[in-house]
Image (cartoon, grey):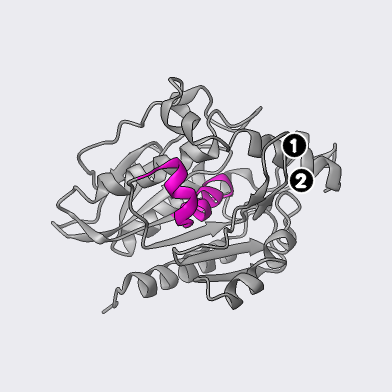
Amino acid sequence: MNPTVRKLFFSMLFALSVGAASAQSNPSHPDLVFPTEANELSIFSPISMGIWKPAGDGPFPALIIVHSCGGMKQQIDYWRKESIKRGYVAFVIDSFSSRGSPSCRPAPPIPMSRGVKDLLDAAAHLKTLAFVDSSRVATVGFLWGAMVGMLAGSPKYVADVAPGLGALKAAVGLYPACYFPPFGTSQGGELLRPDLATPTFLLLGGRDTETPPEECLSRLPSLQERNAPVEWHVYQESTHCWDCKDQNNQRWSPPWAGGRAVLYQYESRVTEDSAERAFAFLDRRLGIEKK
């Protein structure tokens, strides 16, 4: 992607991501209303905000699933099913629909700071439920949701946008951006903050032209050298959104791509491997021993 065009795009994201006050007091960004009961997953379960759990009383570890810029897409259903199959409560949150737009087109309806508060509010809510193991709450996110999860791992950032809320036990992010540039009078900065404290695992696509992996790969080794709890894996031949079955072979020209088409290619093998790697990481970080 042309550097100038990328700067414009991520400047837009940054403009929508700053300001703790807007995250907490803007009347168009009210707190989400979370469900108080869980359902058991079936073929009739809608792809919407809700809590689904394995059979039994628990308590179970829980995974908060945070959507991409595309909103509530098919990939949500895949990861929800995987969570339940592997013994996790799946809490799908929808930060966009009730706030003016189901997706990032033409722009996200909320700042990223509000998304961080949504995520940590969801974690606090889960910890009140008897069937959830309150010591084992984590997140998996996609693009926008992955970036939210990364920021939620920074104690300094959380202190600004969601004071008083606790940290997650672990975070997994698929095909995120890792940096946004300065915009206007605001400082730009890292989505992978130097004070990252939440164990974080990033899955990246080597052929991703929407959020090229180089922006993460140029930062991850030095962060790891500073003993930050971060890990990553690159699928060298994969594009952005490799787990988006409903968008296979979709070509479109995002405003930030300078007219160039971006290709999504669904890969079932990589999607399955992503789940294996993600849940192996989560089980290890949450101290879950599989029988």
Task: Tell me how many marks there are.
Answer: 2
Q: Quadrant of the C terminus?
A: bottom left
Q: Amino acid at mark 1?
A: Pro
Position in image of residue 38 (x %, y %): 22, 44
| Nearest to the observer: residue 178 or residue 78 | 178
Q: Quadrant of residue 289?
A: bottom left
Q: Residue at x 67, y 38 (%)?
A: 186
Position in image of residue 181 (x %, y %): 73, 46
Residue 76 relative to residue 243: left or right? left
Query: From what the image shows, is residue 195 above or below residue 162?
Result: below
Position in image of residue 112 (x %, y %): 54, 39
Query: From what the image shows, is residue 137 above or below residue 244?
Result: below
The span shown in magenta is: 140-163
Q: Are marks 2 and 1 in contact (CB under 8 Å)?
A: yes
The residue wearing badge 2 is 262
Residue 82 relative to residue 144: left or right? left
Residue 58 relative to residue 185: left or right? left
* Crowd around label 2: few <14 · some 14–19 · many ≥20 (10 Å): some
Residue 32 relative to residue 3: left or right? left
